[in-house]
Amino acid sequence: MRRTFKIILKLGVLLLLILGIFIVINYTLLKRVVTYPANNEISSTEWYTPKAIIKGDNSTNYTLSDSLTIDKTVLEEISSYAENQNSNALLVLHRGKLQLEKYYNQTTKESTSNSMSMAKTITSILIGIAIDEGYIESEKELVSAYITDWQDDQRNTITIEDLLLMQSGLRVDNNVQNIFSDVIGLYMGTDVESTALKIPLSKVPATAFEYNNANTQLLAIILEKTTGLPIEQYASSRLWKPIGAADAGWWLDKEGGMPRTFCCYFAQAEDWMIIGQLLLQNGEWRGKQVIPEKWISKMLTQSTLERDYGYQIWLNYESGGNREKDRKSPFLAKNFLIDGTHNQEVIVVPQEEIVLVRIGEKPTSWDESFMINKILTSLNRKKTTSID
């Protein structure tokens, strides 16, 4: 009996020791999991530390237009809708003129927020710029050309384009209840690069669309390897300063570590509107081609595996696509969408030169087409009236 007790005691001590080591090694991860601001994950910017600074020069500042081209009652209606849906910011640009700029819930023009997956589009833009500058030969290249550890395993047929189109075949593990899951490691862990590099293949590449945060993180690893710069510095010099944006931040996995490039880009709502307008203008800004025009064309080309997706951006207009469930009625015009969790959105309608930005917490009941269709209906009514 006494011997059995000693064995149990030793096992208990060993388990406590193992638990202690685990807690020490994973202290930051555990702290993040326990303290995560689940009810205000978009607005609680101070929680996301440390951050890398993406320097801008804050030289582009829009002011409300004196002459509205969108009916004022429509603007009031969509503003009311946004406010009732837990929004913090709503901005509408039409033909380059600011029609609406509203902030709610103590949010101001200078406030930043967690972009969630809107950051994926930023990463895609940077890939296009890096290809144009010759750092990367083509998106058709094998990832293993840059991640040499993959050359001798099953992932050696994955291309950069597969990552862009979310068709890499890498395992999708989004179990938020499991602290050892891929999604927890990527979002809360302290070594996002190692986590992404260890994710195994689960499908043959280029055979299925599977939205996976690891794909975007791997794109960032390629960017840093090829350019020789931290991605936040590359983003600042090639994109953020050229468009005159204000300083932004990217959540790091640890002090001096790597940004989580699949999410967590902290920028002002106006600067997301500038990104939308930049894409609308085929990458040109103030007479300079910031993003190669041919890259934007590729970004906005439908994937053969998912009609609502391009290169890390949503193409949000057809029936039968991944996003159809998010709207109650069809869009009245083709559009593309920069999107993040809880409906962080930049919706661009090229036909009418509309850029709409919505930032906020989780809506109670979101209809993705409501605001855009209200605006389009009003503009169509104006055209009909002017013809008559």
Image (cartoon, rainbow, N blue to C red):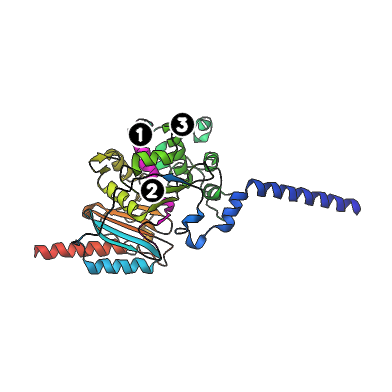
Q: Reading the chain from its start, which is encountered first: label 1 or label 3?
A: 1
Note whether residue 54 is visible.
yes
Please tell me in which quadrant of the rendered image residue 363 appears: bottom left
In the image, residue 359 above or below residue 84:
above
Point out which mark residue 247 bears.
2
* Side of 206 relative to 352 (left or right): right
Q: Secondary structure at mark 3?
A: loop
Q: Amino acid at mark 3?
A: Tyr
In this view of the protein, which residue sits in the foreground, 176 or 359?
Answer: 359
Q: Residues within 10 Å of mark 3 (few under 14, many from 20)?
A: some
Q: Amino acid at mark 2?
A: Asp
* Side of 184 relative to 377 (left or right): right
Q: Secondary structure at mark 1?
A: helix
State the image coordinates of residue 61 (x, y, percent, origin top left): 28, 52
> What span is colored magenta in the figure?
106-135
Residue at mark 3 to residue at mark 2: CA–CA distance: 30 Å
Closer to the camera: disc 3 or disc 2? 2
Q: Residue at x 42, y 36 (%)?
A: 223
State the image coordinates of residue 344 (x, y, percent, origin top left): 39, 57
In this view, which residue lies farthest toward the right?
Answer: 2
In this view of the protein, which residue sits in the foreground, 31 or 108?
Answer: 108
Q: Residue at x 30, y 48 (%)?
A: 59
Residue at mark 1 to residue at mark 3: CA–CA distance: 14 Å
**Label 3, on which residue?**
146
State the image coordinates of residue 219 (x, y, percent, origin top left): 44, 39
Q: Residues within 10 Å of mark 2 (few under 14, many from 20)?
A: some
In this view of the protein, which residue sits in the foreground, 57 or 284?
Answer: 57
In the image, residue 248 above or below residue 289:
below
Quadrant, the C terminus: bottom left
**Label 1, on which residue?**
131
Residue at mark 1 to residue at mark 2: CA–CA distance: 25 Å
